[in-house]
Amino acid sequence: MTDKTPSGNVAGPLLQTVERQTGENPRCAIVWLHGLGADGHDFEPIVDEFDFERLPAIRYVFPHAPLRPVTVNGGYVMRAWYDIVSPDFAPGREEAEGVRQSARQIEALIARENARGIPDERIVLAGFSQGGVIALHAGLRHPRRLAGILALSCYMPLSDTLSAEASAVNRDVPIFMAHGRADPVVPYDFGKRAARLLKELGYPVQWQPYATEHTVCPEESQAVEAWLQQVLTDAF
């Protein structure tokens, strides 16, 4: 049964989630968003790839995206954070209201972590592909300081509104971005362009290219683990 959001939240019912905890009374949380057509179980196995002794106790929250028709897939209904109307994922062509609606739903999940005792500064917002798009959009606009933003194999949504909508408290939030050079789904240049834009705006972006396709390779997982150690170091 789906939980309800706190009173007054306009996001509607809380998204259903898969959760893993790496210790009792976790002091940190990672809200990790899957890609198009997948679900919250997609990145659940990555938890076991990390060395629990090198990281604080973490609650991993893997939400299921809503079911919606996706235009580029012939209107087929699947789990998607927003509709995609163009096969080339050209920046600015994503369904803006879908992006913003999903961001509001992620804000509700962050608020639930707050209610469970984990402050924003110990929450990482992470995502892969479409999930990375939402992680970037929501994280850069989040009104309270986050621990970090992890955006893998994705691109920058609604970049034309970022300057006006960016949250001042997250102008120095650590950002880890990675992309496969041979990615046939989300072109490598889209990810590189997003990282370049953020660097030009002064964000501390760590950009990592990999010799892989639209996936997370072992070397990338190791780099993500090292980055998580850095941004969650004060939680030990």
Image (cartoon, rainbow, N blue to C red):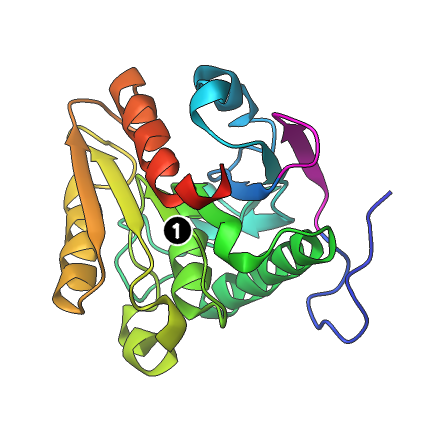
Q: Is residue 167 visible?
A: no
Q: Amino acid at mark 1?
A: Gly
Q: In the image, is residue 24 part of the stretch drawn in magenta?
A: yes
Q: Nearer the viewer, residue 212 or 236?
A: 236
**Spot occupied by residue 132 in the image (x, y as percentages of width and height):** 40, 47
Inspect this view and state whether residue 50 appears.
yes
Identify the residue at image location x=51%, y=40%.
32
Measuring from the top left, give residue 192's x and y in whole percent. Answer: 16, 48
Q: Residue at x 25, y 20 (%)?
A: 219
Q: Which residues are magenta?
A: 15-26
- Give left or right: position of 168 versus 209: right
Please state the horizontal and vertical placement of residue 119, each as a whole percent of the image: 59, 57
Instruction: Tell which of 233 and 81 is nearer to you.
Output: 233
Total count of labels = 1
In the visual, does 198 lie left or right of 49? Answer: left
Q: Residue at x 51, y 16 (%)?
A: 48
Q: Which residue is mark 1?
A: 148
Relative to 157, say whether 233 is above or below: above
Q: Position of residue 131 (x, y in %)?
A: 46, 45
211 left or right, relative to 235: left
Where the N terminus falls, by quadrant?
Answer: top right
Q: Quadrant of residue 95?
A: bottom left
Is residue 137 located in the magenta-colored stretch of the structure? no
Quarter of the rendering containing residue 214: top left
Furthest residue toward right: 1
Q: Secondary structure at mark 1?
A: strand
Disc 1 crowd, CA 10 A, few/some/many (<14, 14-19, 20+) = many
Q: Residue at coordinates 51% horizontally, 27% vertically from top-left?
A: 43
